[in-house]
Amino acid sequence: MAFIILGFALSFNAYLRQESPAKNLSQINNSELRSKIKLFENYSSQTLRIAVLNGCGVSGVGNSYGNIFTSKYGLQVTRIENADNFNYEMTTIIILNKDNPNVDNILTILGTNINAGNVQFNSTVNPDEDIQIIIGKDYQEFLNLNQ
């Protein structure tokens, strides 16, 4: 019985000395964050200004999108607020300034292109923004890929 208890104690001690996967994961995430390349920097006076509007009704989704756009991609988020309603099934992108060369980059990040059905053009909405992103009920796909 003493040998069994001793064996258990030694194996438990060895187990405790191993690095936990959670520690490894946090170290990877921190080093990843330090080396992120922000796709929208280094364009003189061509910063893409975006508004994030919650069109799905889930609390906090707009802030999550905004944080990803600023911290991971270096975008300038001009405002985060609710959309005109919470019935958007798909995330809708409204391009307000199609002359900005970074519009294609943001569409790629969002997993769409300029010819997609959820991309609209409207140059009369807000001159302080280049693009509005109205978050739809499909928001988790984007968040799962980017967090």
Image (cartoon, helix red, strand yellow):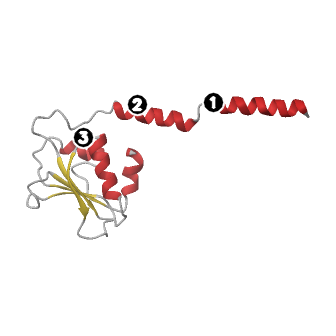
Report the disc number at residue 18.
1
* Residue 55 visible to an observer of this rendering: yes
Q: How many marks?
A: 3
- In the rendered image, which residue does mark 3 sit on? 74
Image quadrant occupied by the C terminus: top left
Q: Nearer the viewer, residue 85 or 34?
A: 34
SS of the residue under disc 3: loop
Q: Amino acid at mark 1?
A: Gln
In this rendering, position of residue 17 left or right of residue 78 = right
Q: Quadrant of the N terminus?
A: top right
Above or below 84: residue 127: above
Quadrant location of residue 21? top right
Read off the residue under disc 2.
31
Q: Nearer the viewer, residue 122 or 53?
A: 53
Residue depicted at x 37% and y 45%: 146
Element under disc 2: helix
Q: Residue at x 54, y 38 (%)?
A: 22
Q: Nearer the viewer, residue 96 or 67?
A: 67
Disc 2, disc 3: CB below 8 Å?
no
- Give the class, few, some or many, for how many residues have Cα within 10 Å of label 1's Cα (few <14, many ≥20): few
How packed mark 2 is, by other alpha carbons closer than 10 Å (few <14, some 14-19, many 20 or more), is few
Which residue sits at x=12%, y=40%? 46
Q: CA distance from mark 2 to mark 1?
A: 21 Å
Q: Amino acid at mark 3?
A: Gly
